[in-house]
Image (cartoon, rainbow, N blue to C red):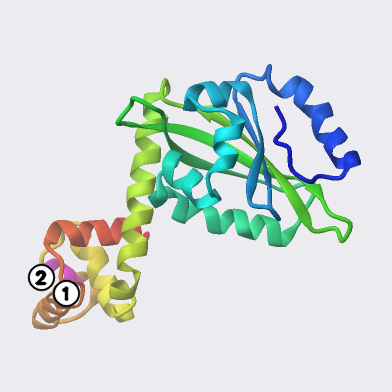
Amino acid sequence: MLYEINLPAELRGKIEEHIITLDHLPCVVIVHDLKERVVVYMSERGLRQLGTTMEEICSISYDEYHNRYFNREDAEDYVPKIMGLLERNNDDESLSFFQQVKFPGNDDWSWHLSSTKIFMRDDAGKPSLTITISIPIDAMHHMTAKAERLLEENNFLRRNFKSYSKLTKREKEVLTQIALGKSAAEIAKELFISVTTAETHRKNIKQKLNASTYELMQYARAFDLI
């Protein structure tokens, strides 16, 4: 079903040509209108899973649609990447990302692997529609676990980037050694500094990051020090 918005007849015809097959694909297909900021098409599989209709989806704001069905934390990671995709405006480029969806009657998030591509352009050659294909990965437990770890690390990185940026180059080197479980004496030997200097760096790092030893490990993983 195609939402009734003011699309040129030629453009509407092109979309409807694709829709004939989209409903039969083993995934959810969504077409977004970038100018109107609305979903103009969602395959029947997606509507059934969300327990909704195109009329209902289009009766709510774009922001409410995303807040109702999608996890805002991982959206903070993939939305800027989608914006970059649109700015580059490349025919051959698509973007794949992990996405969490909330289904009615289920308190848990459902993980999906989604891929977005520019679907149509306006007369000026700028992207006007995007098409997204979304495949559930709940049955692939190892993939879900990896996606959750990736999201957790990305969220940690965003929350703590300002604190991490306060560290000097040497302090980052010491943080790497701390994350590897090295003692002050071992750090001193590895970095060719005195034990007192190593201990001072450890103290300064903890103060700057306001972090426990476990949280220092998180910093090291999130910022690719180990």
Q: Is residue 46 left or right of residue 177?
A: right
Point out the image quarter for the C terminus. Answer: bottom left
Question: Residue 21 placed where, x, y %?
Answer: 76, 20
Q: Which mark is residue 179?
A: none
- The residue sitting at 38% across, 47% down in the picture is 151
Q: In this rendering, does residue 105 appear at all?
A: yes
Decide: is 24 above or below 146: above
Q: Residues within 10 Å of mark 2 (few under 14, many from 20)?
A: some
Real-space Cα distance between discs 2 and 1? 5 Å
User: In this view of the protein, which residue sits in the foreground, 142 or 197?
Assistant: 142
Badge number at residue 185: 2
Image location (x, y in percent) of residue 186: 14, 66
Amino acid type at image mark 1: Ala
Q: Secondary structure at mark 2?
A: helix
- State yes or no: discs 2 and 1 in contact (Cβ < 8 Å): yes
- Residue of label 1: 188
Q: Nearest the camera: 201 or 162? A: 162
Classify residue 48 as left or right of residue 180: right
Residue 23 screen position, x and y as percent: 68, 20
* Identity of the residue drawn at 31% across and 58% down: 156
What's the residue type where badge 2 is placed? Ala
Name which quarter of the figure residue 199 lies in: bottom left
Q: Which residues are magenta?
A: 185-189
Say left or right for 58 vs 144.
right
Task: Give the camera-side residue of 186 and 144.
Answer: 144
Magenta stretch encompasses residue 98: no
